[in-house]
Amino acid sequence: MRRLLAVAAVGVALSNLLYLLMAMNPGQTWAFVATLSGDNFAQGFAGPVLVAFMSGLVNRQFTAQAPNRLWVADATRIPCGEGVFWLAAVRDAFSNRIVGWRCSDRCDTDLILGALEYGIWSRDLRQGELIHHSDRGSNYTSFRFATRLADNGILASVGSTGDSYDNALMENFWSTLKIELVYRRSWRTRDEAENAIFAYIDGWYNTMRIQKGLDDRSPDEYEAAWYATANQARAAAELTNAP
């Protein structure tokens, strides 16, 4: 009974949020996805749950004016001697920084939630400012995932079915990762593969790998420059408005 009440409470919260979002975006196309309780949200809860996502909210415009305005996410397979190995990641469209990632031997809701939680923990998010964009995979449209986005005031956007161009920014990162790391290495164990991915993302890609689209800076350098400029502008405004 407690589980059913918890599900009902979350359902009411999501319904209220969706009502407000739809009222604020009358011209927006919405994708409604029925998900089952197989994502382990609540044991004993039977029947489909209707979850809504903004369809085409990003519209292949993978740009942002500041950090934490648009995140794109996806998961990919990594070859490994021990068998199937999956990597999920979340990328900030402003700086191309990988803000969260996680590895697992399963591509399930726990995997993509782990990458999302990493991003939420490591970034300074503000209610209603961030859009999370992904494909329409069952994990990204699951009730658990939609609830976690709603809990943090993150708007959910999904691309069209089976169209890689609708998540091109994330596909671009997978291509870079595989060309620069995966296709050049082989790993006997999942631990070896995960350590190599950690060294590449956190030790190289985010911190040192320069990109032409970032004025030949790394993602971390690009964000640091933006924050420095923003802080200077804020300080100047405060001086101007001081009595």
Image (cartoon, rainbow, N blue to C red):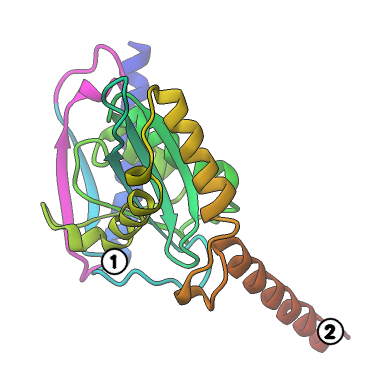
Main structural element of the magenta stretch: helix, strand or loop? Answer: loop
Question: Judging from the image, what secondary structure is the residue with disc 2 in?
Answer: helix
Q: How many marks?
A: 2
Magenta range is 25-47
Q: Is residue 44 magenta?
A: yes
158 to the left or right of 182: left
Which residue corresponds to the image point at 51% horizontal and 74% vertical from the top-left?
214
Which residue corresponds to the image point at 32% horizontal and 62% vertical from the top-left?
169
Q: Which of the labelled discs sits on residue 58, or is there none?
A: 1
Instruction: From the top left corner, tell me how far across and down residue 216 is, in percent.
Output: 54, 75
Q: Give the answer, above or below, for where 42 lies relative to 30.
A: above
Instruction: Mark yes or no: residue 13 visible.
Output: no
Give the CA separation, mark 1 to mark 2: 37 Å
28 to the left or right of 230: left
Q: Give the answer, above or below, for where 54 lies relative to 13.
A: below
Dividing the picture into quadrants, the one containing residue 241 is: bottom right
Q: Give the answer, above or below, for where 73 lies relative to 26.
A: above
Question: Judging from the image, what secondary structure is the residue with disc 1 in?
Answer: loop
Instruction: From the top left corner, tell me how far across and down residue 96 is, in percent.
Output: 46, 62
9 to the left or right of 37: right
Q: Is residue 220 magenta?
A: no
Which residue corresponds to the image point at 35% horizontal and 15% vertical from the top-left?
3
Q: Which of the labelled discs sits on residue 239, or is there none?
A: 2
Q: Quadrant of the N terminus?
A: top left
Q: Amino acid at mark 2?
A: Leu
